[in-house]
């Protein structure tokens, strides 16, 4: 897909080299807080979203995800803290920042009596003169070119989500902010959106910020994630870091799990040991001792077919963290 | 500057597209004007046919005046209200307002682009009804006098003014309240019930000059056929029209700037 050679902000000013500071993170917040009366919806959130990744923003319903997105997009003012989008402070330089951002907050809305094409024509008119030429391309990009002349009222939710992404792409954005893009989609629709997000990142070099409460989808779609709970970010990092097992748990598959259990029962390197679903799970005092344990099993005549660090799902990690917080509270 | 103009033209075109493709609303606006026109004319034709000595033909200058009342004081404004309310609150009703705001485009620009689009649709609908009323005026004139070209041109300008002003007021109120239904109910109630009553309440004296209906009846060209005309100067008529044109749209624009998206 062709990128526009010269970018203009919506007030018609060319976006300068300084504005296009590609070293700046796609999104950055420092102590961002939003209070509604006594209730704190977002509590001193500090995030750094690097460029060129799919970033998952994970949390229960009501955890503060949409409120944070609304502050980032200048739809509501922060009670405290600061934020920048593509290196531009918001809300101070909101118009310039949003000229390079495509966003869907909650579910995408359209005029149901108009066709998908006409809805994009209206969106393109608001975006600026250069965007109209991109309508056919973005419709093709999201796979809606054959239904573009149908009224949006006849579209499925998945098609509306894709049309929403098409509307975001009209302005050739560097950053897409998608709020719960998989909400209400069937498995096929989720797969479509997941593939689309990956292609936007990998093929086109865009940054995609995805908020979701669907842990499995974030794990499958995103490179980096933050977990928000009760308005506070409780963890952030790459998906691998988030799901990594700090306790040094390993999974061993072998020809005789009971025999392996007996061999390792008195091993000083092993902290804990159990058989689960026919595989041996062990916790080591130090992760580096895995090789020695393997050698010991082999020497004892156990045929080891697999020995690897246990990988927990993001869901396990999320539940562990949020449960821990609930207990602490 | 040329970029601004291009964008403005595109935004007006976009609003025009969403309004004219709301076919149910456009058909209703047309029906609101044409159905009473057809009923009035049909009734007059039947009366004249049954007793030509007692009942005059359905066309001619006097009936032209009555049709102007219908199109510029009663049902024309109702059509303008339907269109203005859709223009003012249609994006909120569809949930598209937030997406428009997310583009970073000035909310005032988003509001202003609605006005020419809504007025254009109102004028198109009014134009169709006016052409039909002209056909009735001349087609059923019999031996009666017909309006001169000058009266016709003045009528065109007056109808355009009367219905455009009501359309812009409806647009402003709909943007202010965020409700199409509420705006339509309130303004139709005002236009068809309260305002005609107040215009005729002589105890209110010169206060009635502040009513848009009073101004439009004063400015109406052709024969006097409708409610009483309240005397006023042209300057007062112009000032009252400007005040109506400014107040509600300004409130609508303010609400649009401050509304939580």
Image: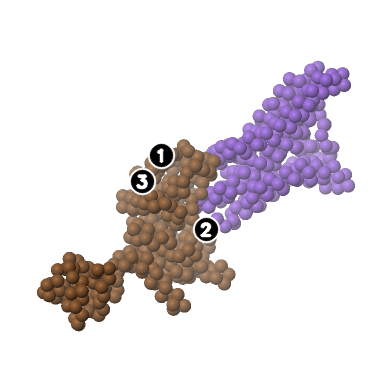
Chain colours: A brown, B purple
The CA distance from mark 2 to mark 3 is 27 Å
Picture coordinates of residue A222, whole percent (x, y) = 35, 59
- Which quadrant does the C terminus of chain B fall into? bottom right
What residue lies at 84% left-to-right and 40% top-to-bottom?
Answer: B230
User: Are marks 1 and 2 in one subunit?
Assistant: yes
Q: Which residue is mark 1?
A: A145
What residue lies at 42% left-to-right and 73% top-to-bottom?
Answer: A323
Pick the residue in front: B187 or A48: B187
What residue lies at 47% left-to-right and 69% top-to-bottom?
Answer: A231
Mark 1 secondary-structure assignment: loop
Mark 3 secondary-structure assignment: loop
Pick the residue in front: A225 or A185: A185
Between tags 2 and 3, which lies in front? 2
Q: State which chain disc 2 sits on.
A: A
Side of A236 relative to A115 (left or right): left
The CA distance from mark 1 to mark 2 is 31 Å
Side of B6 relative to B244 (left or right): left
Pick the residue in front: B54 or A136: B54
Instruction: Please identify the quarter of the rendering in which residue B213 is found.
Output: top right
Mark 3 or mark 1: whose residue is earlier in sequence: 3
Side of A25 relative to A247 (left or right): right
Question: Going by the picture, which residue comes out furthest to the top?
Answer: B143
Q: Which residue is mark 2?
A: A75
The CA distance from mark 3 to mark 1 is 20 Å
* Residue B102 visible, this angle: yes
Mark 2 secondary-structure assignment: loop
Q: Which mark, residue A3?
A: 3
Mark 2 or mark 3: whose residue is earlier in sequence: 3
Between tags 1 and 2, which lies in front? 1
Mark 1 or mark 2: whose residue is earlier in sequence: 2
């Amino acid at each position: 897909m062709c990128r526009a050679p010269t970018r203009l902000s919506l007030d018609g000013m060319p976006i300068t080299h300084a504005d296009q500071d590609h070293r700046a993170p796609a999104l950055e917040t420092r102590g961002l807080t939003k209070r509604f009366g006594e209730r704190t919806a977002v509590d001193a959130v500090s995030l750094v979203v690097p460029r060129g990744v799919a970033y998952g923003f994970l949390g229960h319903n009501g955890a503060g995800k949409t409120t944070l997105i609304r502050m980032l997009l200048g739809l509501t003012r922060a009670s405290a803290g600061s934020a920048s989008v593509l290196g531009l402070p918001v809300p101070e330089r909101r118009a310039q920042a949003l000229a390079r951002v495509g966003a869907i907050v909650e579910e995408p809305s359209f005029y149901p009596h108009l066709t998908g094409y006409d809805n994009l024509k209206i969106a393109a008119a608001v975006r600026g003169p250069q965007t109209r030429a991109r309508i056919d391309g973005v419709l093709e990009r999201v796979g809606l070119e054959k239904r573009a002349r149908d009224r949006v009222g006849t579209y499925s939710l998945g098609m509306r989500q894709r049309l929403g992404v098409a509307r975001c792409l009209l302005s050739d954005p560097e950053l897409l902010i998608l709020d719960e893009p998989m909400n209400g989609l069937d498995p096929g629709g989720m797969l479509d959106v997941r593939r689309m997000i990956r292609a936007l990142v990998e093929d086109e070099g865009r940054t995609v910020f995805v908020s979701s409460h669907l842990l499995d989808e974030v794990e499958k779609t995103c490179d980096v994630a933050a977990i928000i709970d009760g308005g506070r970010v409780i963890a952030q990092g790459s998906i691998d870091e988030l799901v990594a097992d700090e306790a040094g748990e390993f999974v061993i598959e072998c020809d005789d799990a009971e025999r392996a259990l007996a061999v390792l029962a008195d091993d000083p390197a092993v902290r804990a040991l159990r058989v689960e679903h026919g595989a041996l799970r062990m916790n080591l005092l130090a992760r580096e001792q895995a090789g020695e344990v393997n050698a010991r099993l082999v020497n004892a005549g156990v045929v080891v077919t697999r020995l690897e660090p246990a990988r927990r799902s993001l869901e396990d990690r999320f539940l562990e963290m949020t449960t821990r917080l609930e207990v602490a509270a | 500057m040329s970029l601004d103009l291009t964008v403005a033209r595109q935004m007006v075109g976009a609003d025009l597209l969403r309004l004219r493709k709301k076919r149910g609303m456009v058909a209703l606006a047309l029906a609101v004007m044409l159905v009473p026109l057809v009923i009035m004319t049909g009734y007059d034709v039947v009366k004249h046919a049954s007793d030509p000595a007692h009942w005059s033909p359905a066309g001619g200058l006097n009936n032209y005046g009555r049709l102007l009342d219908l199109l510029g004081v009663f049902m024309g404004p109702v059509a303008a209200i339907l269109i203005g309310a859709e223009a003012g609150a249609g994006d909120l009703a569809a949930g598209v307002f937030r997406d428009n705001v997310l583009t970073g485009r000035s909310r005032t620009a988003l509001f202003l682009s609605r006005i020419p689009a809504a007025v254009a649709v109102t004028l198109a609908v009014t134009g169709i009804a006016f052409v039909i009323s002209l056909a009735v005026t001349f087609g059923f004139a019999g031996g009666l006098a017909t309006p001169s070209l000058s009266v016709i041109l003045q009528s065109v300008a007056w109808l355009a003014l009367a219905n455009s002003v009501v359309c812009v007021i409806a647009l402003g109120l709909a943007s202010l309240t965020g409700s199409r239904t509420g705006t339509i109910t309130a303004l139709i109630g005002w236009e068809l019930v309260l305002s005609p009553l107040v215009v005729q309440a002589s105890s209110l004296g010169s206060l009635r000059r502040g009513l848009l209906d009073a101004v439009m009846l004063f400015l109406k060209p052709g024969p006097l056929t409708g409610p009483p005309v309240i005397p006023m100067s042209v300057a007062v008529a112009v000032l009252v029209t400007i005040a109506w044109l400014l107040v509600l749209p300004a409130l609508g624009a303010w609400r649009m700037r401050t509304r939580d998206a």
